[in-house]
Image (tube, rainbow, N blue to C red):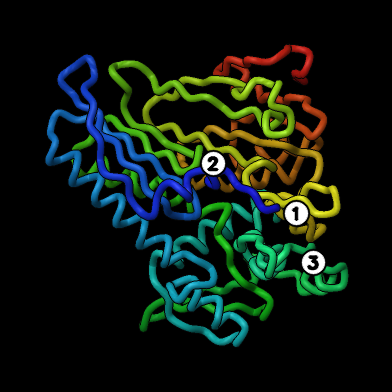
Amino acid sequence: MLKHKSDFFILLIIALVSTSCHFDNNSNKLYQQQLFTFGTLVDISVLSDNPEQAEKAIDLISTEFDRLHTAWHPWENGELGQANQRFSGLKAFSSTASLISLIEQSQLLSEKSNGLFNPAIGQLIKAWQFDQIEDEDHPFNIPGQEQIRHLLQQNPQMQDIVIETSGSGTEIKSVNPAVFLDFGAFAKGVAVEKMIQILKNNNIHNGLINAGGDLKVIGSKNGRPWHIGIKNPSYTRNPEQPEILASIELQSGEALFTSGDYERFFEFQGKHYHHIIDPRSGFPAIGTRSVTVLAKDAGLADAASTALFIAGAEQWQAIAEKMGIEFVLLVTADDQIYLSPAMEERVKLLVNDKRIRR
């Protein structure tokens, strides 16, 4: 059965849950709204003494999330979907500045991650069917070995996309017909970054954007840092484990993103298959249960959490250094916890110290 962390909310909401308002201990009020977009539940929290200003910012964020969901969806008829249809033609075409910026950022991050972050493998990701819902008429099956081998042999890379700028404008093309972009490990972070900027543009100085547990904060909550819990990846397999692995206090401008094998997965013939695909093997990455990354830029935190998940216990330190990531918490498949020195100073672990590997 396919499962993901938003399953329990899909039945409760269709699009938006109306804005709620709570007083804090100061003159500010806490305004909150939830929406379902980017395949997950998004929580918007704003502290403000100006209700019109707060509600305007929340409305703008809701509208922008919905726009980006369509624009950056790999298979719908938005900017990205149209580009994916044209890459196989190997001819240059015009696109939007927003999509070109996503491609440029992804090319740099892919290079720094030694290709572990690779949005060009969209066809491989689609072959695993994590975008579908299982029912009796459409049961899940893992892709065949021959299909995976064929997709790997095509070897699509972000560097296969060429960006050409001339006097008439900027065009893009792929030199590899197998390129099919899926920004599922990056777009959410970039979107959260954009929403934080909307808050700032509307003079909101204290707030939180939480997209399915991946979040960024500005300012403070009632004059105190934002107190965040990090989910224990072992809890979904063993409810006797604590549900929260660690807690951390976030300062203004910090983003916290987690990639976990419990987010989207299905069970097939007694095996657990999650949605984080290793571009080297074509199969879900092995050896890791979750990676949490703290960074200033939400897009970087999103991409890095995926790359470090794939890198695993043996390679995560080298990849983190190349990507410029200081704060990492990694949990292996055998429940060992790895912490970067900077992260160890920030988090409060709620589990046995015997699991920690320094």
Residue 205 in sight: no
Residue 242 in sight: yes
Residue type at mark 2 is Ala
Task: Look at mark 2 in the image and give the residue it sits on.
Answer: 301
Task: Look at mark 3 in the image and give the residue it sits on.
Answer: 143
Percent coordinates x, y for residue 280 in the rendering: 79, 58
Residue type at mark 3 is Pro
Q: In which quarter of the image is residue 292?
A: top right
Q: Do the residues labelled 3 and 1 touch (CB within 8 Å)?
A: no
Q: Which of 253 and 248 is in front in this view?
A: 248
Of the image marks 1 and 2, the number of the one nearer the N terminus: 1
Say which residue appears at 39% left-offset and 71% top-offset: 96
Question: How far is mark 1 from mark 2, CA to CA?
Answer: 18 Å
Q: What element carries label 2?
A: helix
Task: Look at mark 1 in the image and give the residue it sits on.
Answer: 278
Q: Which of 274 and 281 is in front in this view?
A: 274
